[in-house]
Structure formats: structure tokens, C-alpha cells
Image: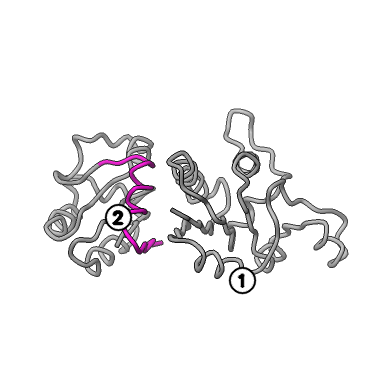
């Protein structure tokens, strides 16, 4: 299952809720302000680091770039994808949950 | 693969409309089919042709219309949400005695059944909103 999260963990609990409910083996894609959840060294990073043991976490590159977040500032293990990668994730997962 | 996309936010207030557009472009260029784009809630504001953003800004409404004409997309605006927000096509203008219409080319006004059908007919339904 693919989950997309579009809110910063600093403004909303949707990332936390998503990670607590996502089944092992799920894909979680951070888009829009959701990409702030990919930042290393924040108060929310441990949550994501722990989740990476059970789920794959991706961050959308154009949304990272638009916010000045470069790849070397991200939590290790997070994969950066473009819109083509977003489309691929939407194909390989048979269900999609968009957390809004 | 057959995709449908739901857009729940208006242009220029939230990234949802841009994200949906970029996703659809990427899906089309990868050879996938877009069964329908359904505009709901404030998302109906994507369908007024009267918007005039500054020239150095993207024209979100025209961008949808152009994409629809290039790829024969079905852009559907929810009728109840549209009536509340003043998005009107010629039929609705007549029915509600309005002095004009403002629906953008490529868009059509219809009901929620179109969203349900999109969910049934498509392999995947993605929602972009706030």
C-alpha cells in the first residue's frame, strides 16, 4: 500500500498517524510540506528512523528542492524520487491512501 | 494503468492543484491513462476561465485546459460545490438565471456519481488536497 503525506510533522500529526498505522512493507511518500518529515536531526526524525525498519520512505525531489532541502540533509535510508517515481509507486502499490 | 485524480483545493492557495497536475503529466508521459479528474470542494475554482494571474506566474486554469485538449482529459467539476462558489456553465447559468457563465474550456459540470464511477472504473484513485 502507498501512503502519501503532504503535511509537515511540525504542523500536523498526519505523518505520525500514518507511520503508526502503515503495515510493514508499505511505501510512504512525503510530498508538499510533508517533505519536512524527511529532515535529519529534527524532533520528528527518530519517529521516521524507527519506521524505516518496517516501511520504505520516499520524498518527492521537486518539493524538497522548492523548500531548499538538499539530499545530504535527509534521514539516511530515505529515497528521493521525482514525479516519475511517484507514478511508479502508484502503479506498484494496489491501494493508495492520501493522508490530507 | 488507468488513473483518476481528485482535486480538493483551489489554485494559488494550496499546492494540491499543482501536485495533481504534475502527477498527471508524469503519468501521461509514462504511457498511462487518466480516466477522469474530479474537482471537488474549493477544487472547483480550478475551472473558471476568468482568472488572470500575473504574466510571470503559471496560469493554472489554462494549464488544465491545455492538458485536457492535448490528451482528451475528462475534467469534471462537482455541481453542488460549483454552485456554492459561482462556477457556472451555460446550462447552469440558464437554469439559475445568471447573467453569464465562466467555465473554462475542457471542464464540464456534473455530479458526485462521476467520482464514484471514476473510483470503480480506474485502477487507482489519488486525492490531492489540504
Query: Which residue lies at the image location 19% right of the left edge and 58% below the top edge?
Result: A55
The stretch drawn in magenta includes residue A81: yes
Q: Residue furthest top?
A: B56
Label for residue B113?
Answer: 1
Residue B76 at x, y = what percent?
64, 58
Tell me the SS state at disc 1: helix
Q: Residues within 10 Å of mark 2 (few under 14, many from 20)?
A: some
Callouts 1 and 2 close, C-beta under 8 Å: no
For residue B47, the mark is none
Q: Secondary structure at mark 2?
A: loop
Where, quadrant-wise, is the N terminus of chain A in this rendering?
Answer: bottom left
Q: Foreground residue, B103 or A96?
A: A96
Relative height, residue B85 to residue B54 (above, below): below
Look at the image and tell me in which quarter the C terminus of chain A lies. bottom left
Q: CA distance from mark 1 to mark 2?
A: 37 Å
Query: Would you identify the image quadrant in which residue A62 lies?
Result: top left
Q: Which stretch did the figure color magenta?
A: A80-100
Q: Is residue A20 left or right of residue B11?
A: left
Which residue is at a point 20% across and 54% down the rendered structure image? A56
Residue A10's tag is 2
Amino acid at each position: 500500500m502507498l501512503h502519501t503525506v503532504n503535511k509537515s510533522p511540525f504542523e500536523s500529526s498526519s505523518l505520525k498517524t500514518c507511520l503508526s498505522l502503515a503495515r510493514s512493507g508499505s511505501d510512504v511518500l512525503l510530498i508538499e510540506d510533508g517533505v519536512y518529515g524527511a529532515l535529519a536531526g529534527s524532533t520528528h526524525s527518530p519517529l521516521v528512523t524507527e519506521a524505516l525498519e518496517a516501511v520504505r520512505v520516499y520524498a518527492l525531489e521537486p518539493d524538497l528542492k522548492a523548500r531548499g532541502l538538499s539530499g545530504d540533509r535527509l534521514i539516511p535510508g530515505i529515497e528521493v524520487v521525482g514525479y516519475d517515481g511517484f507514478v511508479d509507486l502508484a502503479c506498484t502499490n494496489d491501494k493508495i491512501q492520501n493522508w490530507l | 494503468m488507468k488513473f483518476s485524480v481528485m482535486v480538493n483545493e483551489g489554485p494559488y492557495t494550496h499546492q494540491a492543484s499543482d501536485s495533481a497536475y504534475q502527477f498527471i503529466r508524469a503519468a501521461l508521459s509514462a504511457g498511462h491513462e487518466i480516466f477522469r479528474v474530479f474537482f471537488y470542494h474549493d477544487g472547483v475554482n480550478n475551472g473558471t476561465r476568468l482568472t488572470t494571474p500575473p504574466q510571470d506566474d503559471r496560469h493554472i486554469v489554462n494549464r488544465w485546459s491545455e492538458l485536457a485538449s492535448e490528451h482528451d482529459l475528462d475534467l469534471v467539476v462537482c455541481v453542488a460545490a460549483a454552485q456554492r462558489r459561482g462556477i457556472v456553465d451555460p446550462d447552469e447559468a440558464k437554469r439559475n438565471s445568471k447573467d453569464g457563465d465562466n467555465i473554462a474550456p475542457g471542464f464540464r459540470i456534473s455530479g458526485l456519481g462521476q467520482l464514484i464511477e471514476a473510483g470503480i472504473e480506474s485502477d487507482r484513485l489519488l486525492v490531492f488536497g489540504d
